[in-house]
Each structure stands twice: as structure tokens, then as C-alpha cells.
Image: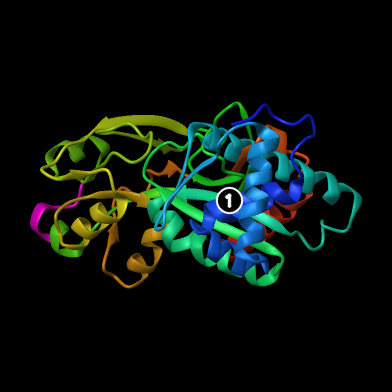
Amino acid sequence: MNTPRKESPLPEDLRVFLTVIRKSSFVAASEELGLSPAYVSKRIRVLEEVLGARLMHRTTRNIALTDAGERAHRWAVRILDDLDNFVGELTDVRQEPSGLLHICSSFGFGRNHVAPAVALLSSRFSGLEVRLDVFDRVVDIVAEGFDLEIRIGDDLPAQHRARKLTDNHRVLCATPEYLASRGTPQSLKDLSTHDCLVIKERNNPFGVWHLQRDGRDESVRVNGPLSSNNGEIVLQWALSGRGILLRSYWDVKPLLNAGKLVRVLHDYTQSANIWAVYPTRLADSAKLRVCVEFLQDHFQALAE
């Protein structure tokens, strides 16, 4: 690759680059952008010449980023975000946000609650392109290129900004059949004689339930024959009568109302508020602010 040109990359070339990555195809990217494949290829070639580095390995079936391409990808997302934010501060984007919004969340809550909210968000703001990824692990939103994380629990990263979307808590529950067979626990220490369905989800402590009662924190070590790193699997086990579950009220409320699950130890809960977490550098993003306010209104309405 030749010595890089002195000029800076054009924003539109960066957008073409990101579209090719997202579509994994020059042809598909050209169709989305309304450009010819030859012109898309030319813009990528110009970008590589400006940067003085090969960004992609291209075959007839696949596109793979080089190491330089991976770095260029991260910078292109950041640069275009900053440009969108700059334009947003000087235009009416506060009312009609546009551009790419990359959101992540935990697997269970993301699938069951964030996904429907994101669909409504996209319907409300047609200029937005939203990508939602879900994980059962801790996510470094800056290193992995996310604009926003929808997160459950109050163990918030100090290096990021956070805004509470709505209040929430976890509750203890089991099926009527399990309780009829094993008895209903009357105190926290009674859990030691029960099969407790333990979740190792994201960064929650494994085998220890930290609970609150009358404003005081209490902890109990629990165990049982079944455990998983996936909350939905554990919920399935609970519904099969295999033990006592500590689960977000958002997830079990319909099951409690239907009588499929029964709460135990009503005085004990675990705080699990729902938060929007985003990088400090996006704190002034008008697009992000509009979207977070939309999600806040949405989740608070559901909680009422």
C-alpha cells in the first residue's frame, strides 16, 4: 500500500465502508446505497489510498477485515457518531433523530422487553437504523462499539453515564407443585434446605443471593442440583417444578398472575432497576438523548 495521502477520509467514504461491513457484500451495499458496485469498490479503494492501508480481504464469497480494517471500523463509527452529534446540536434532530444506533442488553431482558421497545422506537423515528445485540456476559460498550446498553441492576460502571429508565426488583418464586412437595420457606435460612435454581448471569455473584428486607441488606448462600448461565433456562426449570427462582419481576409477573408461579418470602426482594448506560463521550448526543427519553417513557408506561 502506498504512503497515505495528506487529505482526511471523506465522511461519505466512511459510510460506504461501514455499509459494506454491515452487508458483508459490495453488491448488497451498493443496492442499499443506491450506487453501482463499481462505484462502491472505487470509494473503498480511495479510502484505502487515503489511509495508506488495506482494509479488507475480498473473495468471491466473503469480506474479512484486516487488522487495519478493524481499527478503521472503530474509528469510522466514532467519527460518524461525532459528526451526527455535531449536526444534531445545530438542527432539529432532537425531534427526529437519524443515523445508526447500536444497542445491547442481556439475553433474556433484551429478547423479551428491549426488542419490542426497539421496534417501536424504529417505527416512531423512521430515520433511525437500530441494531440490537444481546449477551449473557459483561459488555465493554466502548471497546465493542455500542452506543447504548439497556441494563438491569444497580452495579453500574463508574466510567459511563447512566439514566434510570424505570424501577424494578427481583422476587423469589416457585411453582405450587414444588411448594406442595417441599414446603414453603418461612425464613431466609430455610432456603438452605431447598433446591435453589442458581444463575451465573453476566457479573452477578454465583450461588449467593443478596436481598433487601425493610431497607436492610441480607445475604444467603444457596445451592441445588441445577444451575445455568442463562436466565431463561433457569426459568424453564422453575416452571417444571425443579426449585426456587430469583427472577426479575418483569419476567415473572404474567406467570404470577396466571398462578403458574407463587411468590415466597414476600418481604425479600433484590433491586434490579432498569438503566440506560452510554459512553461519557455521547453524553451530549441529541440523537441518543431522544432515544433514551423514548425508552424511559415506554418502560415507565409498562410498569404502571
Residue 249 occupies quadrant: bottom left
Tell me if I can see residue 275 in this picture. no
- Where is residue 31, by image quadrant? bottom right
Residue found 76% across the figure and 59% down from its top: 97
Check the image and report above or below for 186 versus 205.
Answer: below
Q: Is residue 293 above or below residue 278?
A: below
The residue pinned by badge 1 equals 102
Along the horizontal axis of the image, is 269 left or right of 100? left
At 74% from the left and 40% from the top, the residue drawn is 9
Q: Position of residue 152 (x, y in %)?
A: 48, 45
Q: Is residue 58 visible?
A: yes
Q: Nearer the viewer, residue 187 or 124?
A: 124
Asked which colour scheme the image uses, the reply is rainbow
In the image, residue 17 sits, relative to residue 156, either above or below, namely below
In the image, what residue occupies the spot 48% across and 49% down? 105
Q: Give the magenta-colored segment's residue range.
A: 180-185
